[in-house]
Amino acid sequence: MAQKGTNRNRRSTQRNRATYGSVDELAKEIGISRQAAYTALHRGIIPSIRIGKRFVLPRAAIAEWLRTAGQQALMQ
């Protein structure tokens, strides 16, 4: 029985990784430093959910932010 619980937890963790990203992953993906990513998060430039001192980055919100940021840059 312990095995089933372990598999369930593993699937849940994999699903969360697909839904949420880390600051390091975001920085690498968009080509900025980790410190620049944290600065933008603290300033509210990058969409995130703050839980205590931790930033949770919903991938869908990041994708939308990147899409609309590109469109806004083209319009300026």
Image (tube, grey):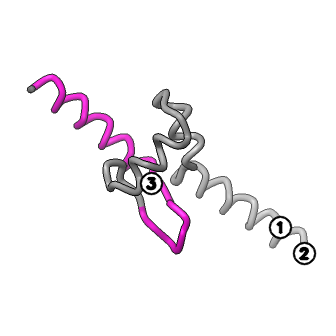
Q: Residue 35 at x, y = what percent?
A: 52, 43
Measure how far apart labels 3 and 1 are at the Cα level: 25 Å
Q: For the residue carrying disc 3, how many other residues have a C-alpha within 10 Å: few (<14), some (14-19), or many (20+)?
A: some
| Circles 3 and 2: CB atoms closer than 8 Å | no
In the rendered structure, the answer to whether residue 37 lies left or right of residue 3 reads left
Residue receiving disc 2: 2
Tell whether position 29 is magenta: no
Instruction: Classify 10 Å Cα crowding around label 1: few (below 14), some (14-19), many (20 and above).
Output: few
- Farthest residue, direction left: 76
The circle drawn on residue 6 is 1
Q: What separation in Å lies between label 3 and label 2 (alpha carbons)?
A: 31 Å
Return the residue at label 3: 58
User: Looking at the image, do the residues carrying marks 1 and 2 touch, with CB atoms under 8 Å apart?
Assistant: yes
Q: Amino acid at mark 1?
A: Thr
Q: Is residue 75 above or below residue 39?
A: above
Q: Measured from the top left, where is residue 55 in percent x and y?
A: 50, 60
Residue found at the far right of this picture: 2
Q: Main secondary structure of the magenta part?
A: helix
Q: Which contiguous range is marked in magenta?
A: 49-75
